[in-house]
Image (cartoon, rainbow, N blue to C red):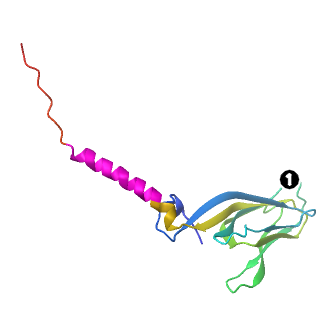
Amino acid sequence: MSCHDDDCSDDHGLAGQSKLESFLFSCELSSKVPFYTFQGDEEEDLEHFLELRTVCLGEGAKEESNVVEVTAMNHQGKTISVPIANLHISCLPMVSLGEFELKAPVTIRLKAGTGPVTVSGLHLIASQVEESDFSDEDDEDNDDEDDEEEEEITPIKPAKKKQKQ
């Protein structure tokens, strides 16, 4: 699931569409905290996604390889682990992942190295928009349109001319 500004800029859509909210996400991995598990709330009508954007070595990183991997479910519902970055302070201190989107739950692990490594991106929350969410707004919109039509129908009266004396 991917969302562009044009697709998600307003909440006025047809019933049954999803509403997408995004929040900043960041976690730091190190030898002290080698993994982070991202999980969404367990509400039935919400889906949580993690869109990873960058993986970056932090201040104090050593001259060593720092391998970061993610563990998530594939399309068959099986859990798989995939390395997403192999960072080294002298040649590759940061990697841009673009819009690498995964459905929760996701575990991010520092597979090799001592870090610190900061992983950042967006926490996306998708919810289904129901018809009742729009019915009040639609009524208000229709009222506004009726008012505009009435204003447009009112004829314009010519200005009265002043008489010369």
Q: Give whichever of 32, 60 is nearer the camera.
A: 32
Drawn side of residue 137 relative to residue 144, left or right: right
Residue 67: quadrant of the picture: bottom right
Residue 80: quadrant of the picture: bottom right
Residue 53: quadrant of the picture: bottom right
Q: Does dot 1 land on a helix, a strand or a loop?
A: loop
Residue 89, position as x, y percentages in the image: 84, 60
Measuring 53% from the left and 67% from the top, which residue is drawn there? 130
Measuring 83% from the left and 64% from the top, which residue is drawn there? 88
Is 139 above or below relative to 156?
below
Is 60 above or below relative to 65?
above
Measuring 69% from the left and 87% from the top, which residue is drawn there? 76
The residue most toward the bottom is 76
Measuring 8% from the left and 19% from the top, which residue is drawn there? 163
Residue 45, position as x, y percentages in the image: 63, 70
Q: Is 25 contained in the magenta span? A: no
Drawn side of residue 52 relative to residue 34, left or right: left
Q: Which residues are magenta?
A: 136-154
Crowd rating for badge 1 (residues with CA inside 10 Å; few <14, some 14–19, many 20+): few
The residue most toward the right is 32
Q: Quadrant of the C terminus?
A: top left
Residue 140, position as x, y percentages in the image: 42, 53
Q: Give whichever of 126, 88 is nearer the camera.
A: 126
Q: Which SS does the magenta portion mostly show?
A: helix
Q: How many marks?
A: 1
What residue did someone put label 1 on? 59
Drawn side of residue 122 relative to residue 137, left or right: right
Residue 103, position as x, y percentages in the image: 69, 73
Q: Give whichever of 116, 37 is nearer the camera.
A: 37
The residue most toward the left is 165
Q: Is 150 contained in the magenta span? A: yes
Q: Quadrant of the N terminus?
A: bottom right
